[in-house]
Structures are given as C-alpha cells and as structure tokens.
Image: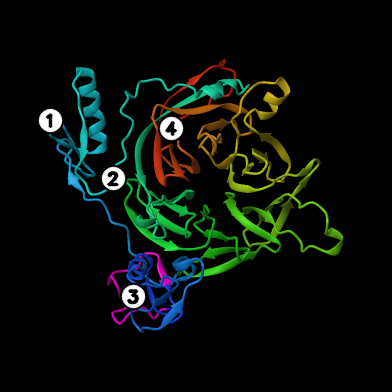
C-alpha cells in the first residue's frame, strides 16, 4: 500500500502530496483529480492504464470512485490564504480593500469601518485582496435587536429568556475528499475543543479529522473512521469507531489501544463524567432474521446508553423505559458536570432526552410539538436535534437542524428561550456545537462546511426575579 512513486510519498503525476489518493490494483497510488485528467485523454473510459507500470485495469460502473482509497500516504494540506497587514491595527489577516478610502482592513476593523461609514451616510464596498474567499460578518449595528423567527411565534412555548449573539468569526473547512472539481462543501459532523485554544472538527466525507486554531488556521488533519472523540478531566483521550464497535483510547505514546468492545452495539457518541466514567450512546445492532420473523414489519431503530467505569467495566445499560425504547437514534451526548445529568440529542425521536446518572428519565423536550398537538396550534417546523452542549451554568443549548434555531433549556430540560442573531445568514444548518472557555458558541454547518463563532452580546428576561436566571459574564 505504501508503493507510490520513485521519489517517495508523492503522486507520480503531479509530483506533490496526495489529494484524495486512489490506489490501482497494481499498487500504485495517484491523486483522484490527476487520474481524472489522465483518463480524459484516453478513448476508453472503462479501463485505465497505470501511468507508471503501464498495466491496464478495468474500471467498474463507479469509475474512479470504485478504486480503493489509500489512507497510508501523506495528504496535501489545503492552500492557506495570503496574510497581509491591516492598515488600521497592523495585524496580519485576510484583508479586503474599501472602495471609499482604498484602505485594506481585517474582518474586525472592517466592521468598525463599515459602521462609521454607515452612520455618516457614505457608500462603501469591499473587494477581496486575498487569494481565498473571506466570509462576510454581519454589517448591521451590534445594538440592533434580533427578531424572533416568524414560525417560532406559533411554537406554543413561553419564552422566558432571549439570548442575543453576534457573529465574530467565520471560515470554511476544506476536505481532501472534496476537490474543487466536484463543487461541493464538506459536511461538518462534530466540533469540539482540543485544549491549548484549539478545536477538532470531524467531517463526514472521508471521514477526516481536522485541527484548527480559532482564526481558522489549520494545524493538522488525518483520516479516521470515527464519529466522536473526547478528552476527560484527567487528560485521557477516547474515541468511538462505529464500524468495529469499539471505544478506543489514545495513550501517551500516541499509540491506540482498545478501551472496550461494544458487543451488539454500534457506538456513535460519548461523553465523560468528571470522575472518569464514560457514557457511550449508540444503536443496538438488530439480531439476524429467523424464519419466525419473516413477514413481520421491520423494527424501528433502537438506541442504548452504556455507562462504563474508568477501567472500562459496564456499570449500567439503559435501553427500555416504561413506554418503549428511551432512545431511538442518539446523535450527540453531553453531561452536566454540576449534577451529572445526561443529555442526548435523539434524531429519530425528534427530541432532547435528559436522564440522571442512574439512567432514570427526567424529561423529554420536543420543542413544543406535544403542546401544539394538544392545543391544536399551527406550526409546520419539525424539531430534529443533531447536536447540543452544556454551558458553564448547566443550561442546555440544542441546535435544530431543520431551521437552524438554537433552543436554550434549563438543566432539567424546561424550556427557557432561544438564541437569536442579527446575522443575515442565521445559524445555517448546525450539526456540531460547542461552547469554549470564553462562553463563545461554535457551530459547524453540515451544508456549507462553515465554522461560525458567536459571542453573547446580551440577553433579555421575560419573567420575574424568582425564576431561574442563567449567568453569563
């Protein structure tokens, strides 16, 4: 698998590190874009002749996509944007030139400059001076009041608190499995902190794991068929491998060892308790069909929550409640370290499920769908949470993948309100969410491949002082 070219771990066509490497049956590896261009020059597109050894190989109906990926070669890092010095703060950044004064501004200074020109009544336009696309931040005054989405006015829920946030940074991720020729965006599956003011992103194409700094600078990337990764309070790193039904641990030497095998369970997500225990949520693997099962309807997916001690021993398994399965398809899990309650985003049940550490069901939050059905209120919007997190006070922030609305819940699951923004793009289609140590909300978009970072600017209370008021510094 490592036999690539005479010059080492590079593509023999472009003589650069690999971009979406494909391996031929003769064991020679090339970039998929390079093979695509090479194939265009041949008359027969159903076969390909190796550019190195000249062996001819038949392609199946999937063409180049039917070739195996080579995960054992160096991937080409994405092109980094050119950094220039801002004319105002003299810091390096991705700049744009103002048509009014011809000065080059970084995103932060550009916002202040736009606001000043807006107040003075002057027209302005910024053109890009950097090689890569810059993402425009909201150009409205940060004192503008964000408005409630129209359809949420018919949710049937009483809004107690309104959190207002402003977009402070945004950038696009790039995937080695998503080249420019294919004209697509890498969907973001998970986003989470990695210490040292950095964070990791799991892309569902590939899949790939990317490490970034907050300004969008890529630090590293690697391939790995995992769906979640966490770090415990005692600095142990665990990840789940759904295909092999394993929870694995990265030890100090960088090697990977098995922590526990999840027999009969396809693990999807996990979260740590402060005392070193792990909570792992996933799907029960259906048993093989027997003759007695034939003719019966296919069973719906059924989820499970397993709690392990710090040595990998099963403490508790939670799957069924009094009214059937507690979970259907868990996509994200978070633990409130103030009371050890467990919060799960359940895609198929279309709700957020809150349990105590013993696995007892405390509450299900369905964004008021049961309220609307009971009171016959109109609201066509579905609630499908794919991601959630806890803030420092134990409140739950759950992202609705359908309309991009962020719901804020009390630690026990009671509805508090919404997170609102004046940003014209809204929150997009969030499939990954986290809150950093500065109380900024990070969102990963499953459609456009963007990371958006929001800062809480203010919040409004619509209830008396005896009610619960979350605190944000």
Tag 4 secondary structure: loop
Structural distance between the alpha carbons of marks 1 and 3: 48 Å
Residue located farthest toward the top when viewing the structure as drawn: 464
Residue indicated by mark 1:
101
Which comes sooner in the sequence, label 3 or label 2?
Answer: 3
Residue 161 pos. (x, y %): 53, 23
| Magenta region, residue range | 2-22
Tag 1 secondary structure: loop
Residue 57 pos. (x, y %): 45, 79
Q: Is residue 78 above or below residue 383?
A: below
Disc 3: CA contacts within 10 A as few (<14), some (14-19) or many (>=20): some
Residue indicated by mark 4:
426
Q: Is residue 58 above or below residue 154?
A: below
Residue 123 pos. (x, y %): 19, 24
The circle on residue 133 is: 2
Residue indicated by mark 3:
9
Residue found 69% across the figure and 25% down from its top: 371
Structural distance between the alpha carbons of marks 4 and 1: 30 Å
Q: Kindly indicate the quadrant of the structure image that contains residue 424.
A: top left
Quick check: 425 left or right of 244?
left
Tag 3 secondary structure: loop
């Amino acid at each position: 698998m490592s036999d690539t070219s005479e010059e080492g771990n590079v593509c023999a066509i472009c003589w650069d590190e690999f971009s979406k490497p494909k391996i031929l049956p003769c064991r020679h590896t090339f970039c998929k874009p390079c093979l695509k261009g090479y194939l265009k020059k041949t008359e027969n597109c159903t076969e390909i002749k190796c550019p190195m050894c000249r062996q001819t190989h038949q392609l199946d109906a999937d063409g180049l996509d039917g070739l195996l990926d080579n995960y054992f070669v160096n991937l080409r890092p994405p092109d980094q944007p050119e950094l220039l010095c801002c004319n105002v703060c003299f810091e390096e950044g991705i700049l744009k030139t103002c048509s009014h004064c011809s000065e080059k501004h970084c995103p932060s200074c550009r916002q202040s400059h736009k606001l000043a020109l807006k107040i003075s009544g002057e027209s302005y336009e910024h053109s890009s001076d950097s090689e890569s696309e810059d993402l425009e931040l909201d150009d409205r005054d940060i004192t503008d009041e964000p408005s409630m989405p129209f359809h949420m006015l018919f949710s049937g829920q009483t809004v107690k608190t309104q959190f207002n946030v402003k977009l402070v940074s945004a950038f696009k991720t790039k995937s080695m499995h998503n080249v420019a020729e294919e004209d697509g965006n890498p969907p973001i599956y998970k986003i989470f902190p990695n210490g040292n003011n950095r964070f990791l992103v799991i892309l569902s194409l590939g899949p790939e794991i990317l490490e970034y700094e907050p300004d969008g600078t890529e630090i590293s990337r690697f391939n790995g068929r995992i769906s979640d990764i966490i770090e415990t309070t005692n600095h142990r790193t665990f990840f789940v491998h759904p295909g092999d039904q394993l929870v694995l641990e990265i030890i100090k030497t960088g090697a990977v060892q098995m922590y526990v095998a999840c027999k009969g369970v396809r693990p999807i997500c996990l979260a740590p308790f402060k005392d070193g225990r792990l909570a792992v949520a996933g799907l029960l693997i259906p048993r093989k069909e027997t003759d007695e099962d034939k003719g019966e309807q296919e069973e719906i997916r059924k989820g499970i929550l397993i709690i392990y001690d710090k040595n990998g021993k099963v403490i508790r398994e939670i799957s069924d409640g009094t009214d059937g399965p507690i979970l259907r398809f868990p996509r994200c899990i978070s633990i409130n370290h103030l009371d050890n309650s467990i919060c799960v985003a359940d895609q198929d049940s279309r709700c957020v499920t809150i349990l105590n550490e013993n696995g007892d069901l405390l509450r299900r939050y369905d964004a008021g769908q049961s309220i609307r059905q009971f009171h016959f209120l109109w609201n066509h919007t579905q609630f499908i949470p794919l991601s959630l997190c806890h803030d420092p006070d134990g409140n739950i922030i759950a992202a609705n993948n359908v309309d991009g609305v962020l719901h804020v819940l009390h630690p026990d699951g009671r509805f508090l309100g919404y997170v609102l923004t004046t940003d014209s793009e809204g929150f997009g289609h969030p499939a990954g969410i986290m809150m950093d140590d500065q109380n900024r909300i990070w969102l990963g978009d499953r459609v456009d491949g963007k990371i958006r970072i929001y800062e809480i600017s203010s919040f409004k209370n619509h209830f008396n002082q005896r009610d619960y008021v979350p605190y944000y510094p």
